[in-house]
Amino acid sequence: MGLTLVIMVCGLLLAGTAWAAPPATDQGRLVSAKWLQQHQNEANLVLIDASPTQDYLKGHIKGAVSCSFDKDHYMSYGINTSYGGNDLINSPTDPLPWQDGPTPYIQQVMRSLGINNNSKVVVYDNGGHFRAARFYWTLTHNGAKDAYILDGGLAKWKAMGLPTVTEVAKAKPGDFVAKPVGDAAIATTDYILSKQFKPDTVLVYAVTPVWFYGPYQAYSKLGHIPGSVMVSYPDYFQKDKTWKSKEELQRLFASVGATPDKETICYCGGNPAASCLYFTLKHVLGYPKVRYYYQGSTMGWLDDPRDLPLHTYWNQHLLRDPYFVRWWGGKRIQYLVGDSQVLTVDVRSPQAYQAGHIPYAVNVPVSDLTGKLGADPAKWAQLLGDKGAADFKQLVIVDDTSTPNACLMFWLAEYMGRPKVSVLNGGMKAWQDHKLKVTDKPTVIAPAKTKYDVAIQPAKIKARPQAAVRLADAGQKPDFLGYPRVYINASANSAQLPFDPAGAKVVNIPAGKNFNEYGILDFASNLIKLYEDAGVYKQAEVVCYSDKPEEAAAAYYALRTLGYPKVMVYYPAK
């Protein structure tokens, strides 16, 4: 479609008296429906409707110009092609979708919508969406300084009983001169790679769980950019489609570690939803370091010739495959470095271990920790240290499959303050399914005698109990940014909680539902559906309970892989 057809959408540049600037509020670049009603006929006001074409044609605010395709060009052989918000500004030649056209192209589009250099522009969509923010971003990135978004969009306007019309507005061509403000607000793929996993940077994904965790294949691969966190754009809005309060939004972003002191990079699938995230952080919350907007987003990531990966689990590093263990915990690495950074911890019984285990795995039956040693983290630490679990090592937990027992050791290690713990997904079964070597020879645990010594070296370690992952007293009040507590009863026998939940929500999800029939942790997409369908959302303090602690730990581990920011195991003092 040529530029002439693209810019045929027209609107009305209203004439009138002097402009009254929107009042300065904590909500920055937002104006209310009431305010717009009062100033609808101001001289320099240009009202932009960013809804899809079919919605605009059904009804819009009087005088609003559609920035989507016109009624003659939004259908292609019976298929509706109007996305809304960025229909006209999208490049007609870029190989990636949703990318802005070159500056002269953008300038001509803006002029066709009646925008002048001195215009005051208010953009709206149906409300509670990213379309208005997407147009707003391009408009302001190209130099417009007096631009705003209608808070609540058309939904709020109509809820107030204000009128709409179906007449398509006609615009007088404007004189807008596009002057891009530079690349300080744009991130490239290389920039993302340079910032991944850095403690001072948060990469935030703006789309919904079905995209982030992978059940919906939007692109050639499932999932999200590794290391990113998710704050879905629908969660920015209240039921009436207006933005949530500053306080609510601050809690929401803080829950996943996106705080004002960190640089926040916004992305989504192709960039439309990321513009809403950018607007929310920059203009509603006033975050000072929202400097980078990844225009290519997931599409740009996948288009990179380096074949960059996507993850489906939020914390995919908590699951390890047999080849990871074979190398990092295996024979060759043992004599190539002084002491390998990975230790395979076999939690099965001594008899099962002796019958055949992964080479260089050490045997720490989890029942020894919770049974013989009781609930004393100092004794747990001593036993692990004697087995070579130095503080600098990542512990990879192994059982027959991915079992509640493996999850219990995972939780115990995290409770003791171990920074690097993971589970061999599928356990010994997965190892043997890959036809990898097992041995019945015990692993040597002894001080090093040579420079490259294959013995596992014992270590003295200290337990650093993490109260944040254990609820020892049910009377302790919730303490997660003011969010409520939810109990997950993971008991297979549906045992009742042994205490009064004090009004907290209680859901029953047996531990076995976290694993598939092959003893492997279920797909991230299935797990997030399991928990969210039960009403266990991330913005809650989640406490896992069972009369068998390993079952509670299974729920804990599953939720950790999904990125739940505050999850605990109820493990009372004994």
Image (cartoon, grey):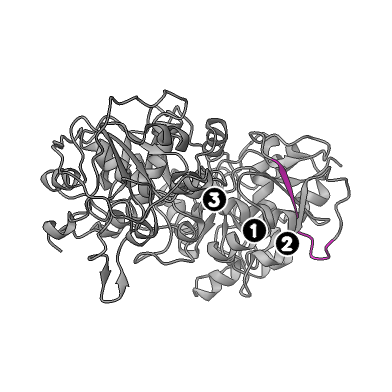
- Is 342 left, or right, of 139 in this rendering? right
Is label 1 in contact with label 2 (beta carbons under 8 Å)? yes
Q: Quadrant of residue 17?
A: top left
Say which of marks 3 and 1 sits in front: 1
Span highlighted in magenta in the image: 484-494
Image point (43%, 32%), residue name: 35
- Residue annotated with mark 1: 531
- How far across and down, in percent of the image, does residue 346 sit? 64, 58
Read off the residue under disc 2: 509
User: For residue 185, what is the image quadrant?
Assistant: top left
For badge 3, the amino acid type reads: Ala
- Crowdedness of circle 2 by 10 Å Cα count: few (<14), some, many (20+)? many
* Viewer-closest of 487 and 286: 286
Residue 409, placed above or below residue 377: below
Residue at disc 1, secondary structure: helix
Q: CA distance from mark 1 to mark 2?
A: 8 Å
Q: Is residue 385 visible?
A: no
Give percent across and percent down for residue 19.
30, 26
**Crowding at label 1, few (<14), some or many (≥20) Cα neighbours within 10 Å?**
many
Q: Are dots 3 and 1 in contact, CB under 8 Å?
A: no
Q: Is residue 88 left or right of residue 211?
A: left
